[in-house]
Image (cartoon, rainbow, N blue to C red):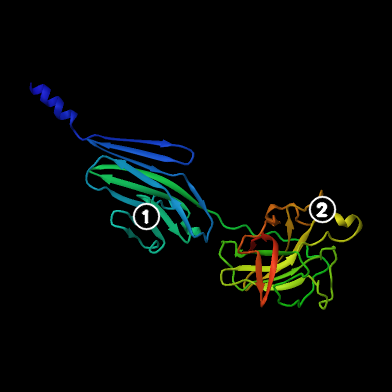
Amino acid sequence: MFAFFSFLLVGCTLCLQVSAQQGTNETVAVTTVAVTTVAVTAGPDRQARPGAESVFLPCRYTGREGAPPSVRWWKEPDTPGQPRTEVYDVTNDLAHHGYLGRAEIVDQASLRLLKVTLADAGTYVCTVERDGGYAEGSVRLGVQGCSPTPRDVQGPYYLRGVPHQRVVCRGGPYMLVKGTVRDSRCSAVPKATLEVWQADPAGCYKINPERPSFCRGKVRTDAQGRFSFLTVRPGKYGSGWWQARPVHVHFRVTAPRRRTLVTQMYFSNNLGEKDPCKFCGSDNPSQLTKPRPPSSDEKNYKVGGTRYRIQEVTEWDIVLN
């Protein structure tokens, strides 16, 4: 009889079992303690750009009824051997230093980081502890900087001192060009100046600013780095075999403490078979844009007191060094 009770005592002794299943982007940790089971599911991994409004790091836990668990988010150290940094105490709804106003909990225990920066990259760990049981799951957050827009040939038709005007080329049908100027950290660049020039629909570059189809203008970015202007779809450049040059718009972008960028924007639906310019970037995906129909809010674009009917819209972001 004594031996039987001794067997029961040993069988009821607290036991801990932890298993981890690694998928391509998912970590599942399960902890069993006596009659209490805690399971944590975190992942998949996430990618974000600096300046993103938010990024969602999933974490959910399950377990039997009992006292509320202690749930926390941590960030693994960049240097091995250093302690983890606590990000958020979910149980007490408390964001820690460096994450105040930038972190919140949604969907039980998932973490949402706001205003993402390059420093946010790393491995985040969601931990759950209850009645001596413990489990954790991890999510890796990758934060990629923005690749600078490639430089391109300036060409012979650049002119200094063009006027500030939001309608670069007149006559219609009109195309709205808009985008954002950023730096290599993906932060918006305000007060950048964009000088724009292009051929008219017949493929001619005008050098007389008094002509209505001068097809040149200068615009500035706003506080969020955004720009927009009206123009018309350019014609193919030059004559003879040079007509093979794909349709494009020239840009010269300057900003305080930034390197001047001279580049060209190409239209993916009007590239032609080849580009006779051996030094131009018409085959670079980051210089391509694809026009689309305007939304209901974009169909009428107001410049000053005049409204222009928009036929197509193209969006193209520029990244400066």
Amino acid type at mark 1: Ile
Q: Residue at x 85, y 63 (%)?
A: 202
Q: Position of residue 244 (x, y in %)?
A: 85, 54
Pick the front one: 44 or 184: 44
Q: Position of residue 17 (x, y in %)?
A: 29, 34
Q: Residue at x 21, y 35 (%)?
A: 14
Q: Residue furthest right?
A: 240
Label 2 Cα neighbours within 10 Å, binned few <14 / some 14-19 / many ≥20: some
Q: Is residue 185 left or right of residue 293?
A: left
Above-or-below relation of 307 to 132 = below
How many marks the image carries: the answer is 2
Classify the position of the N terminus by image quarter: top left
Res 275 label: 2
Res 157 label: none
Amino acid type at mark 2: Asp
Q: Quadrant of residue 227?
A: bottom right
Pick the front one: 87 or 274: 274
Is residue 321 in view from this perspective? no
**Residue at the spot of label 1:** 105
- N-terminal of the two: label 1 or label 2? 1
Q: Position of residue 55 (x, y in %)?
A: 47, 54
Classify the position of the C terminus by image quarter: bottom right
Give the SS element for disc 2.
loop
Distance from disc 1 to disc 2, alpha carbons, whole Å, reads 52 Å
Q: Is residue 162 left or right of residue 28?
A: right
Pick the front one: 179 or 158: 179
Q: Quadrant of residue 296?
A: bottom right
Above-or-below relation of 256 to 90 = below
Give the SS element for disc 1.
strand
Q: Residue at x 22, y 43 (%)?
A: 66
Contact (CB < 8 A) between labels 1 and 2? Answer: no
